[in-house]
Image (spheres, grey):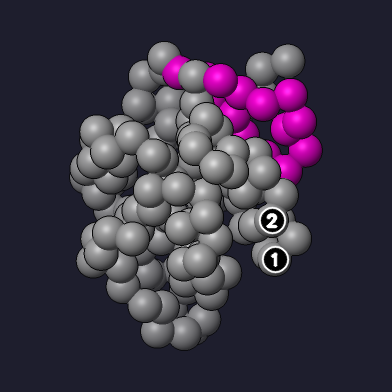
Amino acid sequence: MENDGVEQKTGRGDEQNRPRTVLLVDDKHDSRITLKWFLDTFGYVVQTARSANEALTVFDSSLHDLVLTDNSMPGMTGAEMAHIIKMRSPHTPVLMYTGEPPADRSCLDIIIQKPAPLMELKNALDQLFGDTTNPRPPIPE
């Protein structure tokens, strides 16, 4: 796991004032770095994982507000990981940003199919975090 300066939550009392924490899962280094940089610029705290298995090892529902994942990764897919995340923490949103969406989308809150502008990804995060000024992107059929 890469240490990306993840800050621990200090308690539920400051929930609205603290930055949102995203667990970013992608096996491609360039994608992880680009997405982390992009989300950092909007004030998100981003922790990265190189695989679904690594993400499941570090996932903590009291720390991570959202999981952002690719689908196609060696070992376990992002969709398989999403099922496990939802079993552990049904309220944690899982957003998939992928070029190969899965057939089973039951544990995914939003899917954005690549190539897509990064602002579409940011708008989806805003939607999942309750910013209703941006419309929710549809899950492609």
Residue marked by disc 2? 84
Quarter that holds the C terminus: top right
Mark 1 burial class by Cα count in 10 Å: few <14, some 14-19, many 20+: some
Residue 95 shows in the view: no
Q: Pointers 2 and 1 in contact (CB under 8 A)?
A: yes
Q: Quadrant of residue 127?
A: top right
Instruction: Report the magenta stretch's main SS.
Output: loop
Task: Compute the Cα span from label 2 to label 1.
Answer: 6 Å
Mark 2 burial class by Cα count in 10 Å: few <14, some 14-19, many 20+: some
Q: Where's residue 21, x and y in %? A: 41, 60
Q: Is residue 6 left or right of residue 66?
A: left
Q: Is residue 89 above or below residue 53?
A: below
- Residue placed most toward the observer, 124 or 5: 5
Residue marked by disc 1? 88
- Residue placed most toward the observer, 78 or 117: 78
Q: Amino acid at mark 1?
A: Arg
- The residue sitting at 37% across, 69% down in the picture is 18
